[in-house]
Image (spheres, helix red, strand yellow):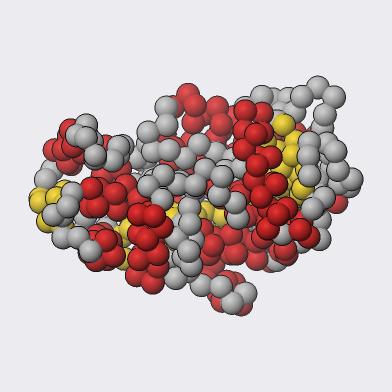
Amino acid sequence: MSERQTSVSPSSSLLLTGFPGFLATRLLPRLLETRSEPVVALVEPSMMPLARERIEALARQRPESQGRVELLPGDITDPGIVESGSSLGEPSEVFHLAALYQLDVPHAAATAVNIDGTRNLLAAIDRLGSVRRFHHVSTCYVSGRHPGLFREQDLEVGQSFNNHYESTKYQAEVEVREAGSRGLPFTVYRPSIVVGDSRTGQTSKYDGPYHLLRWIDALPGGALIPRVPGSSTAEFNVVPVDFLVHALAALSRRPDTEGRTFHLADPRPLKVPEFIRVSASALEKRVLAIPLPLSAARFLMAMACRLPGMPRIPPNAVDYLRHPTRYGTDATTPLLEEEGIRPPSFTEYAERLVAYLRANPEPHRWASA
């Protein structure tokens, strides 16, 4: 498995972006298991060494995958995408996972990757004319701070956004829907907050809820948690990565998912106070919630993160402790039930996440699927 050195048939391949990122690394072997087509992974050139490492690890773990993956250097922020003399081939389906998702990502970088990158990829496959379905991985948080229920069919609801990640992912989804209005078959998948594997705890990134876990775990006697206005009724919606890749792969095979949007979220998420309680219990720590206005909570987070031994947490992560949106799964849940797939509750696997976190203070950079 190497760059342009396999016998992959360009007319019957799947194109995958975002490899060797966290989600794409997990989705790739699932696609190989459930599909007969080989996969062409579009890799940002600077990530090629890591991509090769992960493909080699996959081949060792799953010898049957040998020869079914091709790595193609390419940058979606470049309108040309691939180097002169190379091409995307003629993929039958595209799985677009490449994105910048950090909460504190600068506007220019988020725009270049999330919006311009999606636009460039859509333009490239429009020229190909071979794509039967464009599978776009978005995020539930295109909702921004919409108060109340945000349904799968919703997009423009007059929302404001917490950060540039949310706003640029929203605009990327607009681009996909506009391409759909011009005739491109598409399906949109919106994950909620993604954590490690529910069975092993394994992950290759510590963000989202891990900020909270590390904060609680940093002090031997327990931790102070800011209780900001709105947090008592806010939901903290997380799903493990193994659920996400199984759900995405299953829904992508179904013809009745074309033109639709799916929330890959927990239909029964914990409220923020309960999420904190379960996290503290898994860590065997005590927490004390202290009422603070939002500005003071952000200041406390910024100052505390400067202390030795404390985790570095984006101050705007506090916004998700008072997130006003609930995510409907009315379209998603029935189809996943037909596939025998359900998202486990955070209470079922929190201890596994904690065990992995403590055994691996830094996530395994080379962790494969």
* Residue 65 relative to residue 282: left or right: right
* Figure quadrant of residue 221: bottom left
Q: Residue at x 27, y 61 (%)?
A: 283
**The one of 309 and 108 positioned closer to us in this rendering:** 309
The location of residue 273, given as percent across then percent down, is: 22, 61
**Residue 220, position as x, y percentages in the image:** 17, 52
Q: Please determine whether, in this image, residue 189 is positioned above or below residue 7.
A: below
Q: Is residue 181 above or below residue 346?
A: above
Q: Quadrant of the C terminus?
A: bottom right
The structure residue drawn at horizontal position 75% and vertical position 36%, both measured from the top left corner, is: 72
Q: Quadrant of the N terminus?
A: top right
Q: Residue at x 59, y 72 (%)?
A: 335
Would you say residue 165 is visible in this rendering?
Answer: yes
Q: Is residue 216 left or right of residue 262?
A: left
Left or right placement of residue 192 versus residue 120 in this view:
left
Judge from the rendering whether residue 8 lies leftward or rightward of residue 362; answer left or right.
right
Residue drawn 50% across the image and 36% down it: 100
Q: How many marks?
A: 0
- Residue 339, image quadrant: bottom right
Q: Quick one: 188 or 297, which is closer to the camera?
A: 297
Query: Is residue 271 something that shows in the picture?
Result: no
Q: State the image coordinates of residue 50 (x, y, percent, origin top left).
A: 62, 38
**What x and y, as percent, mark residue 176?**
62, 43
Residue nearest the observer in this picture, 362 or 71? 362
In-front residue for pair 260/314: 314
